[in-house]
Amino acid sequence: MLQRMLVGTRRQVPPIHGVLRLALVFCFFVLITAVLFKPWIEYISTILIGPPTDNMQDFWNSWYAAVAANRHEFFFTKLIRFPEGTSLQYHSFCYLQVFAVAVITEIIGLNRATLISVHNLTLLFSFPLAGTGAFLLVRRFAHLTWASLVGGYVFAFSPWHVQQVMFHAHTSEIGFIPFFVFAYLEAIDRKSVQWLVAAIFFYTLSALCSWYYLFYLAFFVIFHTTFMVFHDRVPLRGWELRAPLLCLGGTAVLLAPLLIPMALTSSAKAYDYGWNAYVIDLPAFLMPPQTHLLSANLGSRYRDFSDFGLEGVAYLGIVNVGLLCWLGVRHRSTKLPVWYVFAGIITFSVLAFGMFLHAFHYNLWIPLPDILFVNLPFVANIRTPARTVVMVYLFLSIGVGCALALAWSETPTIKRRALAIAAAVLLTIDFVPSHLLSTQATCPGILQIIRDDPEHDFGVLNWPRNYPARNEPMLQQTCHGRPVVLAVVSRVLSPSLIDRIEARNLVRQREQLRRAKVKYIVMRPPGTGLAEWMPEDGAFAPYLDTYPIVARSPDFIVFKVYGVSPLHQ
């Protein structure tokens, strides 16, 4: 019964027509992407998308895959967290994105401008891909092309996606998720092995973009199976039982070369806090984020709704919520799967809340299902529940498409259709991104002294050590190519020099650095750029008395630890 509701009336079309339609839809969303992100595209070869933070780490990932990786030992490097190096098993690679950058730059040539351009374009590619996939999925329910295009727009250009593309390359690559859901529903409905293979394929691609999606899509499979059992009130058996097990098992087998080493290296050191911090706050669903047209200066206020503001974005759109409410009221007059959509939105919203429900930055101490995951080995590493909201937007896109299709077809009058078009226009405007930020990716000239040093096998220490400043050495490394002591990896699995470095006794620090062959210190003085000196970083002034300065600019000072001429001593 449910499956008939999820399919509706099918119209048989030749496969070539379906492919051509998807190609046109993709081009349509490419055009929208070019228009909405024109401020980024104009400077595509000199900037990184997003403000200076994890986007610098993401560019390092692309540089590492295209330029610096040891192909025989990709998952361990001494380029960061020098001199000991670090495991990259849990690192924030979007494997499809970084390898696409490596392949494209191998073909068209590798220089810095090209690398920056290709990196940025692979991020922006996620928008038309997500829009096309969501269109295909929404049309499966709504059966109206223009309403499905609007639903695809809602998923692809959601404020959450715009926020993620500025901060996290891996979670921003959401384009394969709707293709997986579509293929999985087709496999269940048709009892088709071919569609199940397609679902496993898209599931694997999604997980290769972000290993968080390995879990989120597993949650979807569990949700869909459970909903079918309770809705149809029949025991789970036959194909309906085999298909989800085969889907999960087949994906696990394909990803085993990555998952087994991750599981084997998973330990208490790999787990970090976040299950009750990087969460969605209840009012955030109606709170426009800082990229909204009407939010010129909402950044600091929005952070009140999460311990980590950029992870707290969940704005659904006022018009979208209104359409869902109307759809709920009108659901008795339609065969659309309204309760399936609402159940999906509610289920994944609850998962995005974290261990306890939060409202207006207060922990209400109402326990939620995520509390079960915190102590599960390996699963405990998906410590950012807020990212589950991507599935909320997927169900939202289906709901919006269905609501518009219903408004268009039910008692079709000029007034009703005009209202439907007006709602589509308003919700589209509501999701137009604004206040887009970027980071200069050109190399500071002051780093030339490090790049041109004839000595080999030495490292560079950047200071101070606050979180944004931990990403900057990775961007600088793409300029000078030398190993860096300070860097960010998604999970720290072993200690290195940066974890034991002396910050207050600079005589001891200098000896530590000599022994570790750290030749330069690149320092941002207090009050410049990303510098935020913390008590544990010591004081700035003693560095001027301890280390000779070999280069200086308004933003940086370069000190030399050893190998200094007597004149500089």
Image (cartoon, rainbow, N blue to C red):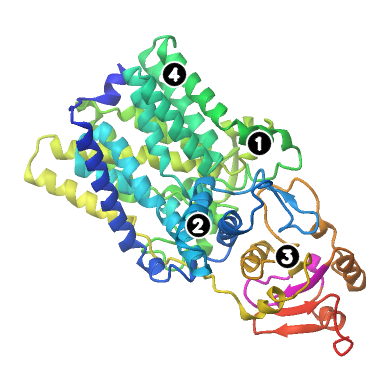
Crowd class of label 2 (few under 14; some 14 to 19; many from 20; radius 10 Å): few
Frontmost residue, 204 versus 295:
204
Q: Earlier in the sequence, mark 1 or mark 2?
A: 2
Kind of residue at badge 4:
Ala
- 520 magenta-colored: yes
Residue 353 visible in the displayed image: no
> Tag 2: residue type?
Glu
Q: Identify the magenta region.
A: 518-538
* Residue identified by numbered label 1: 380
Mark 1 vs mark 4: which is more N-terminal?
A: 4
Dot 1 or dot 3, earlier in sequence: 1
Give how far apart the Cα atoms at labels 1 and 4 are: 26 Å
As drawn, the residue found furthest toward the bottom would be: 567
Q: Is residue 12 visible?
A: yes
- The dot on residue 106 is 2
Question: Which one is in front, 519 or 161?
Answer: 519
Residue 142, given in percent of the width and then of the height, sits at 24, 34
Q: Quadrant of the C terminus?
A: bottom right
